Image (cartoon, rainbow, N blue to C red):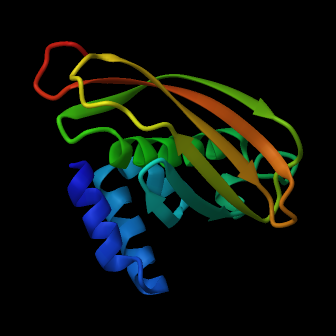
Amino acid sequence: MARSTLETFGRLSGSAIGRWLFSRLVCWRAPYFGSIHPHIETLEPGRCVVSLRQRRRIQNHIGTVHAIAMCNAAELAAGLATDVTIPGSMRWIPKGMSVRYLKKALGVLTATARVDPVADDASARELHANVVVRDASDEIVFDADITMWISPRGSAQA
């Protein structure tokens, strides 16, 4: 999966239309992420950048981007970064998320996830993805530490 995800992004990411198409393909595979209309800007081992723009559908009662919309963007970025970072023999699933809402979130937001490399030793363990969401003026409005459970593919451990 990881290799094909990264290869597909590599083939499509050379243009805005290609990145849009890749983003739609990801949302087709994981439909819930479609609620935030994400745009996957960068995807490489250890890093993923996802942007979303403020729309009425993802606003809260005070006219800012809803906290859960930012959680969705963070989980998407963290999941993709994890997917293309871990060895192909491993799989992942989110296990927990700790978040901080730091400032009102307005306009276009960019979620950047970072994941450390993982050795291919086939041992199940936790992996942390750190995500920072910035607004158009490059101020941090939200951050998250997402715990991923990684395990060998086909194992009963989940």
Q: Position of residue 21 (x, y in %)?
A: 37, 75
Q: Residue furthest top?
A: 157
Q: Quadrant of the C terminus?
A: top left
Q: Position of residue 43 (x, y in %)?
A: 45, 60
Q: How many marks?
A: 0
Q: Is residue 83 above or below residue 55?
A: above
Q: Does 145 sit left or right of 82 as displayed?
A: right
Q: Does 14 sit left or right of 129 as displayed?
A: left
Identify the residue at horizontal 39%, vertical 81% (top origin): 18
Q: Position of residue 94 (x, y in %)?
A: 43, 27
Q: Is residue 16 above or below residue 28?
A: below
Q: Does 25 sit left or right of 56 as displayed?
A: left
Q: Which residue occupies the foreground of this view, 55 or 136? A: 136
Occupied quadrant, residue 83: top left
Identify the residue at horizontal 81%, vertical 66% (top origin): 136
Identify the residue at horizontal 25%, vertical 31% (top origin): 120
Q: Which residue occupies the foreground of this view, 95 or 31? A: 95
Q: Position of residue 60 (x, y in %)?
A: 77, 46
Q: Is residue 13 above or below residue 137?
A: below
Identify the residue at horizontal 32%, vertical 30% (top origin): 119
Q: Is residue 126 above or below residue 100?
A: above
Q: Does 126 sit left or right of 124 as displayed?
A: right
